Amino acid sequence: MLVVADIEGTVTVTGISEELRFHKEGEIKAHSASCRSLCFDLEGKHLYSCGTDRAITVSDVQGMRPIGAKKGAHSHPINVVKLYDNNTLLTGDDEGYVRAWDVRGGMKEVWGQAEHGDFVSDIMCVEEKKIALVTSGDGTLSSYDMRKGNCAYISDSLQEELLCIAMVKKMQKIICGSSGGSLEMFEFGMIGKPEDRFIGHPDSIDSLCNIDDETLCTGSSDGHIRIVSVHPNKMHGILGSHRGGPVECVRHSSNSERIYSCGHDGFLRVWDLEGEGDEVKEDDDDFDDDDSDSLSEEKGPTLTLTPTLTLILTLTLTLTPIPLPVSLTDPYFQPYLIIP
């Protein structure tokens, strides 16, 4: 299942088959302004969203309707919403505030912290270790103790914005993409300063996803999608590209060897890690393929999306999502993609 949200706050739900056939299933009017972030509950029945209207909205995916909202959840536009467990949400806003919410019986604030001096760019929940990792535009990585509801550790501020998070090496290494094009590497439990730095991207790294426990896919503002490995650090090459602007998000499918990406060119692009990939087939006229804009020299099918796209989120065909980190690269609307 593919979920698309736009700058008008409308969430479009689209089916996706193993043969990459797309068909529109319905729309949900979730927000009065731009929708910036989405996440599902563990059963895939409810969708949590947030945006510039400062609200957290809960929507019924099957019923295609909003069923509740927390108005004015933050004093500033909300950039990220992330599921910690089926009872707890985390949100982060433009001014660096992080809040935890109990979703049972209404959206009740559990705790709130203001440790960052700039926008919250990404949140990664690590339920096994009872923490949440947060990156910010102030150049810091922080670790929140979910049991105590406080910031346990925060790194020194770097000279560059930290924009996205991934973990490798059996969750012992934290990798952060930066605005300067470096991958900043932290040892889990020792996040005061990066222990290593991988330089090689000419522009900012706006999104990360795991391919395996030592290999990452990166999306950069130069429009390229790259494959890199960590310890040993190696740039394997360019998987594909988006025209006309940054790659805002990359995600690895949980049930295939495909990478999904989206960017400012208005396309959702699908890249096959093992082969050439199949041509995208479209069953709905609302998604028009523009061959003149596709990258014919590169692998992978494409799907044209609405020009007002702000973000994309997908579930596996069985509707049982595995939460993955949400990556945002700007405090204002940007498209991004999640493949559980």
Image (cartoon, rainbow, N blue to C red):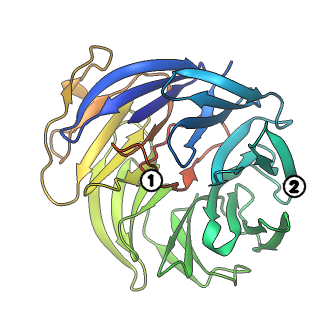
Q: Residue at x 42, y 53 (%)?
A: 219
Amino acid on which disc 1 is placed: Ser
Mark 2 closeness class: few <14, some 14–19, many ≥20 residues within 10 Å? some
Residue 114 disc label = 2
Residue 236 disc label = none
**How much space separates mark 2 and mark 1, taking CA atoms?**
28 Å
Q: Position of residue 21 (x, y in %)?
A: 22, 31
Farthest residue to the front: give it.
105
Q: Quadrant of residue 15?
A: top left
Instruction: Examine the rendering and report whether any part of residue 202 can be seen.
Output: no
The kind of secondary structure element at disc 2 is: loop
Q: Residue at x 85, y 51 (%)?
A: 110
Instruction: Examine the rendering and report whether any part of residue 162 can be seen.
Output: yes
The mark that comes first in sequence, 2 or 1, is 2
Marks 2/1 in contact by CB < 8 Å: the verdict is no
In front: label 2 or label 1: 2
Q: Position of residue 235 (x, y in %)?
A: 34, 72
Q: Which residue is mark 1?
A: 220
The kind of secondary structure element at disc 1 is: strand
Q: Quadrant of residue 160?
A: bottom right
